[in-house]
Amino acid sequence: MRLQIERNSDVPMYLQLRDSFREGILSGELPGGTLLPPERKLAEELGVNRSTVVKAYDELKAEGLAEGFVGRGTTVLSQLFPRSGDEPVMPLPWNQLLNEDSASPNGSIIRDMMRDAGGQDRISFAGGIPDASLYPVDAVRTVARTLLSEDPRSLLLPSPVHGQECLRESIARYLLTRHVTVSGSDVFVLAGSQQGLDYAARLLLRPGDTVVVEDPTFFGAIQSFRTAGARVLGVPIDESGIRTDILDVVLQRYRPRLIYTLPTYQNPTGVTTSAERRRELLRLAWKYRVPILEDDPYSDLSYDGTPPPSLFATDPSGHVLSLGSFSKTLFLGTRIGWIVGARRVLDAFCRMKQYTDLHTNTPAQFLLDRFLREGHYAAHLRIVREQYALRRNAMIRALEQFAPPGVNWNAPAGGYYIWSRLPPSVDVSRLAAAAARRGVSYLPGNAFFADGAQGTTHMRLCFAAEPEDRVREGIRRLMEAVGECSRDGRARTLEHAGAANPVV
Amino acid sequence: MRLQIERNSDVPMYLQLRDSFREGILSGELPGGTLLPPERKLAEELGVNRSTVVKAYDELKAEGLAEGFVGRGTTVLSQLFPRSGDEPVMPLPWNQLLNEDSASPNGSIIRDMMRDAGGQDRISFAGGIPDASLYPVDAVRTVARTLLSEDPRSLLLPSPVHGQECLRESIARYLLTRHVTVSGSDVFVLAGSQQGLDYAARLLLRPGDTVVVEDPTFFGAIQSFRTAGARVLGVPIDESGIRTDILDVVLQRYRPRLIYTLPTYQNPTGVTTSAERRRELLRLAWKYRVPILEDDPYSDLSYDGTPPPSLFATDPSGHVLSLGSFSKTLFLGTRIGWIVGARRVLDAFCRMKQYTDLHTNTPAQFLLDRFLREGHYAAHLRIVREQYALRRNAMIRALEQFAPPGVNWNAPAGGYYIWSRLPPSVDVSRLAAAAARRGVSYLPGNAFFADGAQGTTHMRLCFAAEPEDRVREGIRRLMEAVGECSRDGRARTLEHAGAANPVV
């Protein structure tokens, strides 16, 4: 057996020595009864202090791997890990033991996006996160320093399960801008709104239940619902939002337990559900007595006038639960979101949170509260709205200039995304690679459909993460890639290329 | 209809006005077609600017609640919320819609403890959290300020799903003290170890599956397993840990999918599983091919010599998943824990985390990493070990002095808890109230049993949260309460009162 000791390692030498012996013992290389080298002799051989060897042997004895008696040296304990009969211990068949739908096509999208967000030189239209160069770093630093000088101990204490009272009140006050009038006690603080999707799925869906989503919709929601064992049924959306005529039929036939909707500046289409469709959506929820889960993370990012009020605000009957987040307007790293809805549901959220993560990170709650209270959020919104509007305009102009005939897209009034459809002449299976070679990325449309076979000819293009000149350059490169992947050398005009028409 | 405007409110007046009208419209008090008061007239009546009324009406129009044409005033929209037939909209029957086991006896323990932690003057033996007066506030503040000056932007960026690399490496290095030799990539960062219980339950248990726990055990684990639909089977523990002879029978008869164990300074009993029982536990896991989930949050709090190595460290076969946490040694508020285990399992954790909260709070990860790297953790451990050992000793001395005959308790070598058993002559149904009247609290033992009918004569007494003099005074008061609740005026000696004997 070879002993490896590295003198410049961070790991103390006696631990290195112990680990070498442990590996030998556990692997069977040093069977039970083996006499370990005498301490003095080994110390000389290795050129270490004798105490180093003594400590290593003591560790092995403490672990029950060896035994030693004065005058008899140290020996490996026999019957160390008694096997059942003579069988060797086999590793567990984890693949069979884990409850995982490993066939999930969208399984790694978010992780890959997070990785992508690390920031190479690639022009990224793939992400769904704010531009880090616009982060309100100075304001955050000022607020954080103030909190650290005022009462640092309170930042480390556990928070109430439903969130810090001060933050709940700040969020309630902020929600007035969404036409929502609730008190702080109606606000439940989450570690990001994704957690609300998970809780809602676990509390409202059972395996085999059906949930209705917009087709296409946010893939993270599809995954949360599927993880709860639910069947996810997509109802198409058009330029006015979810097709309520189709929804009516689906509600009758499939008796879903939940309707999930992103009514304002939808992900991935950018579409805003019209006032008429909103009323019809509520009417259907009331008629069939189905709860609605509203996801509303983009409404503060309005570029043409004011966004419509939250769906929650227009439902007097308590059918709507409404999720909010600061992750699209401020930054993701602090993981703060919230839900408002019927008290009975928030009580259930409270129990769920106790058994999932106890409470949301305390310092982040105090930071966000102070940030809102001191007006930094409103100030920051003015900056990002202006910037993102310019980027949206730049992307549309670039598409008008560079898109081959047959490529369609829409012009959203807010949010992050332009939704683009490619003509059938484009070989989409080659497109992502062709774009990557040109240093540009996007998300393929099929990730957003309940049925992953749909949407292959669509692209979600996030215009928020790159400055105007890179948006323009990225679209130029991407459209070059589209041209390259056209089956006839360039895209044929198979349909009307209505440049600014909604294509959803 | 009465309009209420409060001039000194934080809510702008136009929003107050809009909300009053909205309520009237939604309640039906202002039916469709109603002409709202002319702007100028209403402004005069209320003594506000005309623009305030104009803005309020604009809001109502934007929400689709009213319409207005020049010269014709503003009217409530008819057919605002078309009802199905003439039925009124009924609130949803949330109680039936929610997947909740509302019969759970332990439902609110954690929330109540968090509330209790707020800190009245009550002497609390009920909690399971560190003493806030010992928080390493100065070191945290110094580290936080350094991070804020160095690179504040990186604190707000999203983290990798499995955690920041630097923290994973720091935890791997720290784990050497637990005899665990892993690399950073074997460490998965969690928002506290409770999240690991939740993920393990969701990934390894299906509804109807059986999970084995120690009887008694941490109630948060029982809840996580029950939330996953599992049947929780308790195997008794004695002063040497889980009764492996009984475990053998249970493994044969019930074919459980998971064994959950707290082998070191157990919660609630303070018991440490002996080396022999640990070997036998591993042997059984190998024989029946059952994964073990080790929960190891207390082992750094050793008061008499070194703790045994983590169970994970002595299992060469990958059957053990091991959860760790800083919440018992440092503070709870940042919510940082971790798990080490088979790569295949960590991959599944990664997917689960994407669909539950994306990643753990970024600033807390950088803070804990730096805190570990700069040696603050080791320094802090020296302080809390010394303090908590004194408190343990004080509690034992006070019990010896004040406990009526028949009251038993043990003397744990580490952790937070003394586990005490009351004689049958004590009316436990009156005890909590009698203790509360004397300003002292504890946790009743039945919260820790899979079968809530067990353990009613036990108390979990946390000695960590109060200084020595209050520990002593609290035990004096508590034992006074025990005396008061004795059916014969004072506790009879029904069994041997072995003062320092384990009673589990």
Image (spheres, coloured by chain):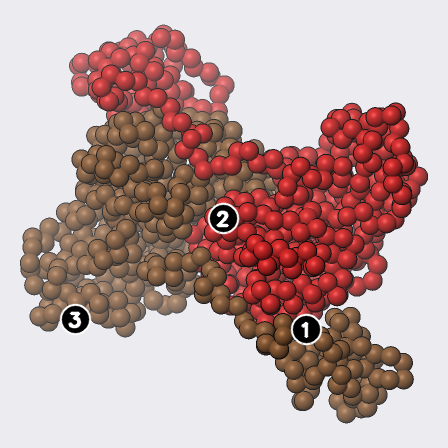
Chain colours: A brown, B red
Q: Badges 1 and 3: C-beta atoms under 8 Å apart?
A: no
Chain of the residue on which disc 3 is drawn: A
For the point 38% across and 46% down, which residue is it? A207
SS at circle 1: loop
| Residue labelled with disc 1 | A81
Task: Give neighbour class at mark 3: few <14, some 14-19, many 20+ (Cα, 10 Å).
Answer: some
Classify residue A214 as left or right of residue B332: left
Circle 1 chain: A
Q: Are marks 2 and 1 on the same chain?
A: no
Mark earlier in primary sequence (1, 3): 1
Secondary structure at badge 2 equals loop
Say whether marks 2 and 3 touch (CB < 8 Å).
Answer: no
* CB within 8 Å, label 2 to label 1: no
Residue A461, image quadrant? bottom left
Disc 3 marks which residue? A484
Q: In this orientation, does residue B237 appear? A: yes
Q: For this view, does B131 lie left or right of residue B478?
A: left
Q: Alpha-carbon distance for marks 2 and 3? A: 55 Å
Please identify the quadrant where the N terminus of chain B is shown.
top left
User: Which residue is drawn at the image coordinates 59% and 73% (left, top)?
Assistant: A89
Quadrant housing residue B22: top left
- On the image, the x and y values in percent for residue A212 come to 29, 42
Q: Viewer-nearest of labels 2 and 3?
A: 2
The residue sitting at 82% across, 50% down in the picture is B502
Residue carrying label 2: B208
Q: Secondary structure at mark 3?
A: helix
Question: Dot 2 falls on which chain?
Answer: B
Q: Nearer the viewer, residue B222 or B90?
A: B222
What is the number of the mark on residue A138? none
Amino acid type assigned to the residue bearing label 3 in the image: Glu
Q: Which residue in the rendered view is the most extreme toward the right? A: B401
